[in-house]
Image (cartoon, rainbow, N blue to C red):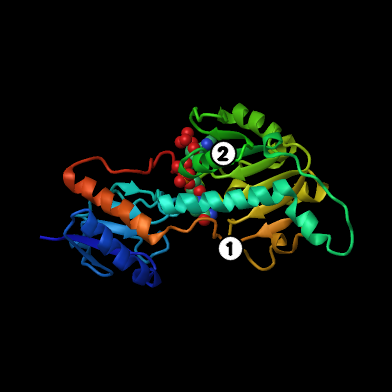
Amino acid sequence: MPLNVLFAATPERWATYEPALQRAFKGAGLDVRLALDIPAGEVDYVVYAPNSELQDFTPYTRTKAVLNLWAGVEGIVGNETLTQPLARMVDPGMTRSMTEWVTGHVLRHHLGMDQHILHQDGDWTPVVPPLAEERRVCVLGLGELGTSVAQTLKSLRFDVSGWSRSPKDVPGIETFNGDTGLDDALRSAEILVLLLPDTPATQNTLDARRLALMPQGAFIINPGRGPLIDDDALLDALDSGQIVHATLDVFRVEPLPVEHPFWAHPQVTVTPHIAAETRAKTASEVIAENIRRGEAGEPFLYLVDRTLGY
Ligand code: NAP
């Protein structure tokens, strides 16, 4: 009997994911019936995006796991009808994508690229950037994405620090944890990258008090989640010069409403939540491996801790 795997994401994803998942299932030696529509009581696994129509998991009595296509689970972790194991997406393709995106924006600010591109009117004012090793970049969140970002920046010789909930040992990187650790990490953060999940404990991580701890003229890059930053406090910090520029990929409301001051602010770069898309090929291999593990009685990878919310 084949396993019944329901694809519960927005239907336009089907054309990309169906062949990638079929290939990955075959590669993992799984006999699978993959479909957009399977009676709830017959579904063995759900491949899931939190913006799908499926929100009530009560009738999915046979389902062994829900395999999220997204890294962020804030849109589903509080769903009380979902009692099955829930895995978040850890996708090597997504990790590479995030690492490239952050590295590009760190280099933009580090090298002062905007400054030189704007001066094309005969103004020959060279501003020589420091070397990477003279620039402290701090990464909030040392999980799958944050650790990859921190290690890549370190490989470019940046002076890298990182902060996480639990203590971490990442070679070459100064690590901090806990509330006082955050304050200490921020004090030297010339470029700050936010790669935390959106949980009750991380909302407004960057508030007015913490923005004031950062070195004057710091840069902020947020590809994590919008609620990590207090928007009004950030706008005040930009206007006062405490923060020189913010590159924001994620927002409290998405798409960012046209009237939001971030759009027009000269020191804000808005990108439309594109830092790291899940990549169908590599993500499908991760999903297939998790189903293989489930069928072999092995523990699932990347299970969400519902009490922590990530
Ligand atoms: P992850 O592996 O779960 O890592 C999360 C990190 O945040 C961990 O280091 C964790 O600490 C830390 N953390 C969580 N709560 C904390 C707290 N209260 N205080 C301090 N540190 C805390 O997640 P990931 O895969 O790296 O993804 C991170 C986030 O990136 C996602 O949740 C999502 O919101 C965002 N994202 C955005 C995009 C985009 O396109 N913009 C794409 C993918 C993901 P511990 O290590 O101690 O657990």
Compared across the picture, whether 264 is left or right of 182 comes to right
- Given this view, does label 1 or label 2 mark the residue nearer the observer? 2
Residue at 70% over, 59% down = 262
- What SS does tag 2 mark? helix
Measuring from the top left, give residue 106's x and y in whole percent: 65, 47
Front residue (pair 29, 111): 111
Disc 2 marks which amino acid?
Answer: Ser
Q: Is residue 197 above or below residue 214?
A: below
Figure quadrant of the N terminus? bottom left
Front residue (pair 30, 257): 30
Measuring from the top left, give residue 291's x and y in whole percent: 24, 51
Q: Is residue 225 above or below residue 162?
A: below
- What SS does tag 1 mark? loop
Q: Which residue is mark 2?
A: 155
Residue at 80% over, 51% down = 239
Measuring from the top left, give residue 7's x and y in whole percent: 30, 64
Q: Quadrant of residue 193?
A: top right
Measuring from the top left, give residue 186's x and y in whole percent: 67, 34
Front residue (pair 230, 28): 28
Tell me if I can see residue 201 in this picture. Answer: no
Compared across the picture, whether 169 is left or right of 42 comes to right
Compared across the picture, whether 195 is left or right of 18 comes to right
Tell me if I can see residue 259 in this picture. Answer: yes
Q: Which residue is mark 1?
A: 272
